[in-house]
Image: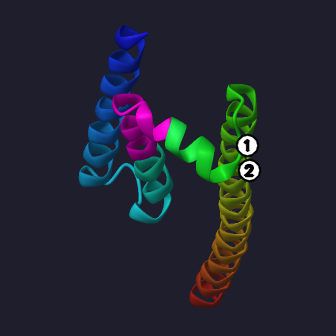
Amino acid sequence: MLQMQVFVGIISVIFFIVTFELIRKRYLREEYAILWLLTSSVIAVLSLWPGMVDTLSRISGFYYITAVLVIIFVFLIFLLMHYSIVISKIKEVNKELIQSYALLELRLREVEEKKERSSLE
């Protein structure tokens, strides 16, 4: 059991470092990374100090590990839903920008053609 706790703790610390590196290299925006940093920190703390899980279960009243796993699963589902909403909004904005660009390009071509015709006459 101790080996698994150390393994999960090391993985969460590595994930924390990778998240910071992605922020530093501008692959990941800070506003979206906060949840990932928080999640990896909580997992690291809970895996490296297993007594904390018992304390939290006494405070919250969840004495069965399956109840805790359900809460974690629901949290991850909400996290994924949040990012799906953000991605959907970005996709919609990109679509509108592409359409505006296409209309502006068409308008520019029309103006250029009109200018060419007027200069030929």
Residue 77 is tagged as 1
Nearer to me, 22 or 91 = 22
Task: Give the magenta range.
Answer: 40-53
Vertical placement of 121 versus 64: above or below? Answer: below
Q: Is residue 114 magenta?
A: no
Identify which amino acid the numbered label 1 is placed on: Ile
Could you tell me residue 120's position as x and y percent? 60, 84
Image quadrant containing the N terminus: top left
Q: Do the numbered discs 2 and 1 sit on residues whose CB atoms are within 8 Å? A: yes
Residue appearing at x 32%, y 19% in the figure: 6
Query: Which is the main secondary structure of the residues drawn in magenta?
Result: helix
Nearer to me, 40 or 55 = 55
Could you tell me residue 11's position as x and y percent? 36, 24
Which secondary structure, mark 1? helix
Image quadrant of residue 14?
top left
Residue 81 is tagged as 2
